[in-house]
Amino acid sequence: MTVRKGKRLAISIQEHMAIDVCPGPIRPIRQISAYFPRLSPTSSFSEPLSPNQVGAPSALSPGSAGQRAAGGGGSLSAMSSMDTSIEIDSCDSDDNTSLGTLEFDLLYERATSSLHCTVLRAKGLKPMDFNGLADPYVKLHLLPGACKANKLKTKTVRNTLNPVWNETLTYCGITEEDMYRKTLRVSVCDEDKLTHNEFIGESRVALRRVKPDQTKHFNICLEHPPPLPSPTAMSTALRGISCYLREWETEQQRSLEERGRLLLCLQYLPPATDGDLKGEAKDRARGGLCVGVKRCAHLAAMDVNGYSDPYVKTYLKPDVQKKSKHKTAVMKKTLNPEFNEEFFYEISFSELATKTLEVTVWDYDLGKSNDFIGGVSLGCHSQGETLQHWIDCLKNKGQKVERWHTLTNELPGSTLQE
């Protein structure tokens, strides 16, 4: 066909379709959300997006209209993922239309080191049962961390796509450092009594967005879990592998947090004068260290029923005479036990500077060896929060100093055997 110079080439819709359609096997249509960049919950929001992430991917059709659509929507998707607390119109969101929305509040209390999540309601959930309804419940999970150690769950609301919970779930032992680097995963699932529970949708909130002692309201669109993309080019494959390795290394570095938390209270009592001796105080006339085992939170499950039977042991080492062992009572079938027990070590202040306090948590098993859950070591040779707790105890004589500590799966100098 000959076209004169300066004239515009007109192509009919039939010819246009014949040009764009290429022979070959039929491939599944990708979701439109796959063409928009998605920030990882562990990545920093301040990192700039690369040109490959902002632009259209190589898997997009060669038509210029598709490229313009992908390029124009990239920045909007990145902005929406940074702030999910913005009110979202269900008419403008594909994810909202297909999966539904979830409304909840977050409150971090600095004084009690607790994070409260009040799950309010959900709207327009995806039907999961044959009757066109669902039996939804909400599940919380702190990332990174072990699933069983920090998973919280609401009640199940039957036969509805617009459930109302108004239920508050609380995490104890959450420090300000946790609020800065952890992410809360909020999932909505459908409960099935005869088969496995089905996943409806999720959303992930960086806890650094929540200010201490201030309630923050969220009304978010439920999304599919972050998929592992099937690369269509070698550069995409290498980029996916590098992201996977980086997340794997991060999980390995923080794997020690999976054992749980322990709330300890330390108090050094100076020697008392004769006029101050009353009742049980006479046993503490020389002064010494008072160790209070308050409670544990989010312990690792050691039994087949998904729970543990925890108890706590304390040692003040070096212990030549092996008389420093103290043990709390056993709390049955729980991952969040409350002990509220105190142990006293009669020791001078000068001797205490050379001692190390080892606290271990165990799972009691009848008729066989008890399982080690985790432990923490406090002394002048410790590091981080444990060292600071020990120093604050020595500096503030007569005062009780409470701290939450992360249990580690290895304790230096311990045999880890009951």
Image: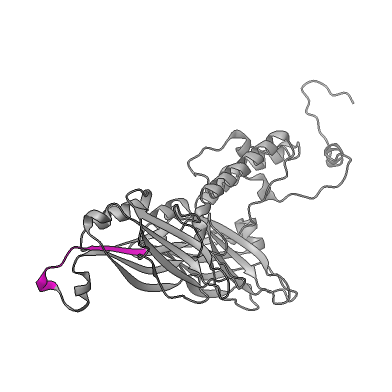
Q: Which residue reaches farthest top?
A: 5
Residue most toward the left? 275
Q: Looking at the figure, which quarter contains the N terminus? A: top right
Q: Is residue 162 magenta?
A: no
- In the image, is 8 to the left or to the right of 57? right
Where residue 68 appears, as percent x and y from the top left, is 66, 39
Position of 8 with respect to 183 (left or right) is right
- Residue closest to the eye, 111 or 53: 111
Q: Can residue 103 be seen in this view?
A: yes
**Residue at the image position 55 percent from the left and 48 percent from the top:** 252
Residue 215 seen in render: no
Picture quadrant of residue 283: bottom left
Taking the image as shown, residue 69 lies to the left or right of residue 373, namely right
Up/down of 416 relative to 71, above or below: below
Q: How many marks?
A: 0
**Which residue occupies 57% across, 44% down?**
249
- Is 32 above or below relative to 221? above
Name the residue at 39% across, 55% down.
377
Q: Residue furthest front?
A: 321
| Magenta segment includes 269 | yes
The magenta segment: 264-276
Q: Residue 37, percent across and down?
A: 61, 44
Which colour assignment does the render follow? Answer: one colour
Is 111 positioned to the left or the right of 31 in the image?
Answer: left
Question: Residue 211's spot in the image, x, y percent?
Answer: 38, 56
Comparing 338 with 82, the one in front is 338
Q: Where is residue 28 in the image (x, y as percent from the top left)?
A: 80, 50
Q: Which corner quadrant of the image does residue 386 belong to?
A: bottom left
Toward the viewer: 368 or 333? 368
